[in-house]
Image: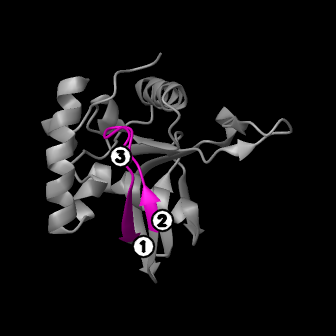
Amino acid sequence: MIREIVVYPDKRLKLISKEVESFDGALHDLLDDMYETMCAKNGVGLAAIQVGVDLRALIINIPLENEDGEHDQPKENTLEMINPVIIEKDGSTKFQEGCLSIPGVYEDVERAKHVKVEYFDRDGNKQVIEDNDFLAIAMQHEMDHLDGKVFIEKLSYIKRKKFEKEWKKRLKEL
Ligand code: CO
Protein backbone atom coordinates (compact mmCIF):
# COMPACT_ATOMS: atom_id res chain seq x y z
CA MET A 1 0.00 0.00 0.00
CA ILE A 2 1.30 3.39 -0.97
CA ARG A 3 1.39 5.69 2.07
CA GLU A 4 1.33 9.47 2.17
CA ILE A 5 4.72 11.17 2.36
CA VAL A 6 5.27 13.68 5.15
CA VAL A 7 6.40 16.95 3.55
CA TYR A 8 8.72 19.58 5.05
CA PRO A 9 8.19 21.55 7.32
CA ASP A 10 5.84 19.03 8.96
CA LYS A 11 6.89 18.81 12.64
CA ARG A 12 6.98 15.00 12.52
CA LEU A 13 10.21 15.25 10.51
CA LYS A 14 11.82 16.63 13.69
CA LEU A 15 10.95 13.63 15.86
CA ILE A 16 13.64 11.34 17.23
CA SER A 17 12.38 7.94 16.10
CA LYS A 18 12.10 5.07 18.59
CA GLU A 19 13.97 1.78 18.50
CA VAL A 20 12.10 -1.09 16.90
CA GLU A 21 11.44 -3.76 19.53
CA SER A 22 9.39 -6.36 17.70
CA PHE A 23 10.30 -7.70 14.29
CA ASP A 24 6.73 -8.70 13.55
CA GLY A 25 4.12 -8.57 10.81
CA ALA A 26 3.41 -4.90 11.46
CA LEU A 27 7.07 -4.07 10.83
CA HIS A 28 7.09 -6.16 7.65
CA ASP A 29 3.94 -4.40 6.40
CA LEU A 30 5.55 -1.05 7.12
CA LEU A 31 8.72 -2.00 5.19
CA ASP A 32 6.68 -3.36 2.25
CA ASP A 33 4.59 -0.19 2.15
CA MET A 34 7.71 1.96 2.34
CA TYR A 35 9.13 0.13 -0.69
CA GLU A 36 5.94 0.70 -2.70
CA THR A 37 5.79 4.34 -1.66
CA MET A 38 9.45 4.94 -2.50
CA CYS A 39 9.08 3.36 -5.95
CA ALA A 40 5.88 5.31 -6.67
CA LYS A 41 7.74 8.55 -5.95
CA ASN A 42 10.96 7.54 -7.73
CA GLY A 43 13.04 7.74 -4.59
CA VAL A 44 16.18 5.80 -3.71
CA GLY A 45 15.65 5.82 0.04
CA LEU A 46 12.96 6.38 2.64
CA ALA A 47 12.85 6.53 6.43
CA ALA A 48 9.76 5.40 8.36
CA ILE A 49 9.09 8.90 9.71
CA GLN A 50 8.62 10.05 6.10
CA VAL A 51 5.43 8.00 6.09
CA GLY A 52 4.59 9.25 9.59
CA VAL A 53 5.88 6.31 11.64
CA ASP A 54 8.47 7.26 14.27
CA LEU A 55 10.41 4.00 14.27
CA ARG A 56 14.11 3.55 13.53
CA ALA A 57 13.59 1.82 10.19
CA LEU A 58 14.75 2.85 6.73
CA ILE A 59 15.06 1.42 3.26
CA ILE A 60 17.47 2.12 0.41
CA ASN A 61 17.30 0.79 -3.12
CA ILE A 62 19.82 2.19 -5.56
CA PRO A 63 18.41 1.80 -9.08
CA LEU A 64 20.16 -0.41 -11.60
CA GLU A 65 19.96 0.12 -15.31
CA ASN A 66 18.23 -2.79 -17.06
CA GLU A 67 18.82 -4.03 -20.63
CA ASP A 68 16.49 -1.37 -22.03
CA GLY A 69 18.36 1.38 -20.23
CA GLU A 70 15.51 1.88 -17.79
CA HIS A 71 15.98 2.26 -14.07
CA ASP A 72 15.03 -0.80 -12.15
CA GLN A 73 14.57 -1.19 -8.39
CA PRO A 74 13.72 -4.84 -7.78
CA LYS A 75 12.38 -5.47 -4.30
CA GLU A 76 15.05 -8.07 -3.54
CA ASN A 77 17.69 -5.35 -3.91
CA THR A 78 16.16 -3.31 -1.11
CA LEU A 79 18.40 -2.73 1.86
CA GLU A 80 16.17 -2.69 4.94
CA MET A 81 17.87 -1.29 8.01
CA ILE A 82 16.34 -1.46 11.47
CA ASN A 83 17.91 0.36 14.44
CA PRO A 84 21.05 1.24 12.40
CA VAL A 85 24.11 2.66 14.14
CA ILE A 86 27.24 4.08 12.49
CA ILE A 87 30.21 2.30 14.08
CA GLU A 88 32.94 3.78 11.86
CA LYS A 89 33.15 6.81 9.63
CA ASP A 90 35.94 8.71 7.94
CA GLY A 91 36.84 10.94 5.05
CA SER A 92 34.56 13.49 3.48
CA THR A 93 32.77 13.93 0.20
CA LYS A 94 30.23 16.25 -1.39
CA PHE A 95 27.18 15.03 -3.22
CA GLN A 96 23.99 16.59 -4.58
CA GLU A 97 21.17 15.23 -2.45
CA GLY A 98 17.41 15.28 -2.70
CA CYS A 99 14.62 14.05 -0.41
CA LEU A 100 11.07 12.82 -1.00
CA SER A 101 9.94 15.07 1.88
CA ILE A 102 11.36 18.14 0.09
CA PRO A 103 10.47 17.27 -3.51
CA GLY A 104 12.27 19.05 -6.32
CA VAL A 105 15.07 20.45 -4.17
CA TYR A 106 18.64 19.30 -4.80
CA GLU A 107 21.64 20.69 -2.94
CA ASP A 108 25.26 19.75 -2.38
CA VAL A 109 25.82 18.29 1.06
CA GLU A 110 29.08 17.26 2.73
CA ARG A 111 29.19 13.90 4.49
CA ALA A 112 31.64 11.19 5.51
CA LYS A 113 33.04 9.30 2.52
CA HIS A 114 33.14 5.93 4.23
CA VAL A 115 30.82 4.50 6.84
CA LYS A 116 30.41 1.16 8.53
CA VAL A 117 26.92 0.55 9.90
CA GLU A 118 25.53 -2.06 12.23
CA TYR A 119 21.80 -2.77 11.89
CA PHE A 120 19.14 -5.43 12.11
CA ASP A 121 17.30 -6.91 9.14
CA ARG A 122 13.51 -7.39 9.12
CA ASP A 123 13.85 -10.70 10.95
CA GLY A 124 15.94 -9.23 13.75
CA ASN A 125 19.30 -10.61 12.60
CA LYS A 126 22.28 -8.36 13.24
CA GLN A 127 24.11 -7.27 10.07
CA VAL A 128 27.06 -5.06 9.21
CA ILE A 129 27.57 -3.16 5.97
CA GLU A 130 30.21 -0.72 4.82
CA ASP A 131 30.49 1.50 1.80
CA ASN A 132 32.49 4.43 0.46
CA ASP A 133 30.28 5.38 -2.46
CA PHE A 134 26.68 6.47 -3.07
CA LEU A 135 25.28 3.94 -0.61
CA ALA A 136 27.36 5.51 2.18
CA ILE A 137 25.75 8.88 1.44
CA ALA A 138 22.26 7.41 1.23
CA MET A 139 22.69 5.63 4.57
CA GLN A 140 23.82 8.85 6.27
CA HIS A 141 20.94 10.82 4.71
CA GLU A 142 18.31 8.28 5.82
CA MET A 143 19.83 7.80 9.28
CA ASP A 144 19.62 11.57 9.81
CA HIS A 145 15.83 11.26 9.40
CA LEU A 146 15.76 8.87 12.37
CA ASP A 147 17.24 11.67 14.47
CA GLY A 148 14.82 14.30 13.20
CA LYS A 149 17.18 15.90 10.72
CA VAL A 150 16.73 16.76 7.05
CA PHE A 151 19.53 17.50 4.58
CA ILE A 152 18.77 21.21 4.12
CA GLU A 153 19.85 21.74 7.74
CA LYS A 154 23.39 21.11 6.49
CA LEU A 155 23.31 24.07 4.10
CA SER A 156 25.09 27.34 4.77
CA TYR A 157 23.04 30.10 6.44
CA ILE A 158 22.62 31.99 3.17
CA LYS A 159 21.62 28.95 1.15
CA ARG A 160 19.22 27.87 3.87
CA LYS A 161 17.52 31.30 3.91
CA LYS A 162 17.18 31.20 0.14
CA PHE A 163 15.72 27.71 0.33
CA GLU A 164 13.16 28.67 3.02
CA LYS A 165 11.98 31.63 0.97
CA GLU A 166 11.60 29.58 -2.20
CA TRP A 167 10.00 26.68 -0.34
CA LYS A 168 7.28 28.93 1.12
CA LYS A 169 6.37 29.94 -2.42
CA ARG A 170 6.44 26.30 -3.60
CA LEU A 171 4.13 25.17 -0.77
CA LYS A 172 1.52 27.72 -1.79
CA GLU A 173 1.58 26.31 -5.31
CA LEU A 174 1.26 22.66 -4.17
CO1 CO B 1 15.27 12.30 2.92
**Residue 166 visible (yes or no):** yes
Instruction: Identify which amino acid the numbered label 3 is placed on.
Output: Val
Query: What residue is shown with label 2?
Result: 117
Q: Nearer the viewer, mark 3 or mark 2?
A: 3
Residue 94 quadrant: bottom left
Q: Which of 80 and 38 is in front in this view?
A: 38
Residue located farthest toward the top when viewing the structure as drawn: 1
Image coordinates for residue 77, horizontal then vertical, percent: 67, 42
Lower sequence index among marks 3 and 1: 1
**Under tag 3, what secondary structure?**
loop
Query: What residue is shown with label 1?
Result: 87
Q: Nearer the viewer, residue 135 or 83?
A: 135
Disc 2 vs disc 1: Cβ atoms closer than 8 Å? Answer: yes
Instruction: Identify which amino acid the numbered label 2 is placed on.
Output: Val
Q: How crowded is mark 1: few (under 14 residues within 10 Å), some or many (20 or more)?
A: few
Residue located farthest toward the right when viewing the structure as drawn: 67
**Under tag 2, what secondary structure?**
strand
**Residue 15 visible (yes or no):** no
Q: How far apart are marks 3 and 1 (CA)?
A: 30 Å
Query: What residue is shown with label 3?
Result: 105
The magenta span reads 95-110
- Give the numbered dot on residue 163: none
Residue 100 lies in the magenta stretch:
yes
Q: Residues within 10 Å of mark 3 (few under 14, many from 20)?
A: some
Q: Is mark 1 within 8 Å of ligand 1?
A: no
Image coordinates for residue 136, horizontal then vertical, percent: 51, 65
Residue 28 lies in the magenta stretch:
no
